[in-house]
Image (cartoon, rainbow, N blue to C red):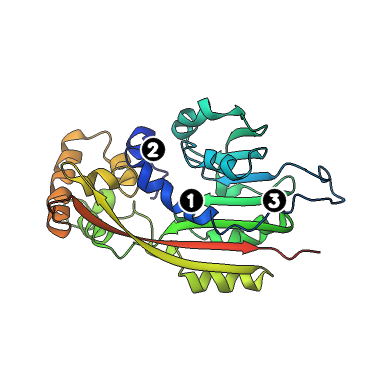
Amino acid sequence: MTTAPNWDPRQYLRHAGHRTRPFQDLLARVPELPTGPGSGPGSGPGRPPRIADLGCGPGNVTVLLFDRWPDAHVTGLDNSAEMLAEAQPLAGPTTGGGRLDLRQTDVRDWAPDEPYDLIVSNAALQWIPGHPDSFGTWLAGLRPGGTFAFQVPGNFTAPSHTLLRDLCDAPEWRDRLADRLRDPASVLEPTEYLERLAALGCEVDAWETTYVQVLTGPDPVLDWVKGTALRPVLTALADDPPARDRFLAAYAAQLRDAYPSGPHGTAFPFRRIFVVARTAQR
């Protein structure tokens, strides 16, 4: 039975620089938002943008939205109480005249309850099987000319993930862990996302990038995946520390072979998929 993982915001933020860069690259391709005159509630000249961040986590990338839209009203949504507690000091009025609100919500069940100019998500939708089925609902919550933009990992065939799946399926761990990991099919290819969103009437920009991240320290790839991909395993073994330590030792040894350390650190290629979908303007 797959259950929601427990999150550790501090572990996640240990690699905040690498985790922030894809979001910055995503935002660079978001077109101007429909914040000009209009006839709907809250519209008018100079209307502040209304933005939703699906899976906002500890808020470290959510606040980057205010760099481009200083007066925006942003709502960050996440189902993790631990992540939202880490983000809470960022909530409230911003120096540019905007506002950040936080809401504990399971994105799988979320539907916009007001018009948004931008719905954005950073490395969260991969945790939601069948998330493309929600695209129609989310797009219906955008103003004409609004944008839905997201990025997700595209590295489920990388050694970091294939080794993890194989280890979870080994005889020692199969009964406890085999069904805990995300299905690689939960993330589509860029062309599939493009086709889905174009069929819903959007103008779509889809692409992929492989970042060759340089990680440092002892077992740096293990330290990276402890913040994300390994969370379901750590959650499942949380009540059995000896078993958790045996699993981590075996996995760490495999990662060291797959990602050998070099004179400048450990190179860790990480493929990501980006999509920016703009709705039609009236």
**Residue type at tag 3:** Asp
Marks 3 & 2, CB-CB < 8 Å contact? no
Task: Judge the density around disc 3: few (<14), some (14-19), many (≥20) Cα neighbours within 10 Å.
Answer: many
Label 3: which secondary element: strand
Is 102 situated above or below 278? above
For marks 3 and 1, the one nearer the N-term is: 1
Q: In the rendered image, which residue does mark 2 sit on?
A: 7
Which residue appears at 25% of the width and 56% of the height?
268
Task: Give percent across and percent down for residue 31.
Answer: 63, 58
For marks 2 and 1, the one nearer the N-term is: 2
Q: Which mark is residue 117?
A: 3
Residue 239 or residue 11, whichever sits in front: 11
Q: In the rendered image, which residue does mark 1 sit on?
A: 24
Q: Which mark is residue 75?
A: none
Task: Give percent across and percent down for residue 123.
Answer: 45, 51
**Residue type at tag 2:** Trp
Q: CA distance from mark 3 to mark 2?
A: 29 Å
Which residue appears at 26% of the width and 48% of the height?
176
Label 2: which secondary element: loop
Q: Nearer the viewer, mark 3 or mark 1?
A: 1
Task: Judge the density around disc 1: few (<14), some (14-19), many (≥20) Cα neighbours within 10 Å.
Answer: some
For marks 3 and 2, the one nearer the N-term is: 2
Which residue appears at 51% of the width and 45% of the height?
55
**Relative to 177, is 261 on the left or the right?**
left
